[in-house]
Amino acid sequence: MLVLGPVLGGAVASLGGGCGSSTNSGAPATAAAACMQLHAAYAARSVRCAGGTVMDWLAYINSFEDCAAYTKHVANKEVKYQTQGWAACLDEYEKPCDQLVSFCGYDILHGLAADGAPCTDAEVCGTESACLDMSLNSGTCGTICMRLAKQGEGCGLWCGGTTPCVSIPFCVPGAACDATGTCVAASPAGAACGSPDSAGCGPFTSCSADPTVAGSTGTCQAQSTSGSCHVDADCTLDHFCLQGICAPRRPLGTACADAPTGCVAWAACDSVSQVCVAAGRLGQPCAPYPGIPYSVNCFVGSCFDGVTCTPFVGAGASCATATCAPGNRCDANTTTCVACPQ
């Protein structure tokens, strides 16, 4: 199962209507319908915690997980639809914005492929796993199920076995990569941070150390809506760092020349007009993920040049200036998209 973004969760409320009849557990009758309600929950929580619109958040979620595919995956015994805990899982999406939501939705829509197994769709991988290209490049041949390292494990991506298959300084939420390359419990608010031997700060907190000053140390502090800041990550997702103070993100049509990372979720500061414009769809600017300006996304197509969302291209097309469509890879020798073996 694909691991969703940092604001996983939300309130279903009226957004879950029309998704199918319920079973005695309160869950929808089909896995596809359950997926739709979970996506609505994700979108509603994301709007509440990070800003933006339900439509844009749904477009983002639907871009990497196809609810309709669950019908096939359940029939092929690649996913097991487990309705137990449905109501409790939905309740998790109502948590305050400074609390993590578990992967309970992916316990319900439980992918059966083991880590390290070949995959073509995210839905078939396990509760905490995703279907990714092990080489982390733009090709899609040879994608396998893998997960982030847990506490006590070597930092990186795990594909089964006893060591990471990709060693990078990433761990599951709530853990941090220490100086030895091991995932340890992330430091809580009030703990020292910034030194080489201190663990990273936990979710919804940031280190007060000044990143522009070499060797600067500080303490882990809760993200703020109005306090002092050095970078956007010091603020809650619906705020950004403006001249050292957290401020609300700016809506569409608002001037942003003085705040290029300060637009509302799924908007970007247009380089010509210098106002916040819609982002993430074809022909629009690539959309920075709220609070993570270096992570740019497109609902459809790709952000090949880091600036504008462009369509995927198919087999035989040049991949020198575009990204190959899923099911193809970019041949490094010819810079041409080649269809992956079926």
Image (cartoon, grey):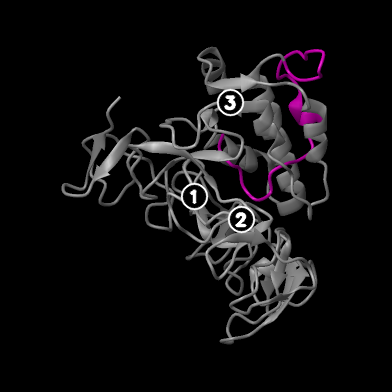
Identified at 74% across, 49% down, the residue is 100
In the picture, which quadrant includes the C terminus? Answer: top left
Q: Which mark is residue 157?
A: 1
The alpha-carbon separation of the residues under discs 1 and 3 comes to: 25 Å
Q: Position of residue 198 (x, y in %)?
A: 65, 74
Residue at horizontal 43 percent and vertical 52 percent from the top:
166
Tell me which segment is drawn in magenta.
1-28
Residue 242: x and y in percent read: 68, 74
Question: On the image, numbered disc 2 is attached to which residue?
Answer: 152
Quick check: is 25 in the magenta stretch?
Answer: yes
Closer mark to the observer between disc 2 and disc 3: 2
Q: Earlier in the sequence, mark 2 or mark 3?
A: 3
Contact between labelled residues 2 and 1, with CB atoms less than 8 Å apart = no
107 relative position to 118: left or right: right
Q: CA distance from mark 1 to mark 2?
A: 13 Å
Left or right: 99 in relation to 180: right
Name the one closer to the observer, 195 or 329.
Answer: 195
Labels 1, 2: front one: 2
Three-letter amino acid code of the residue under disc 2: Gly
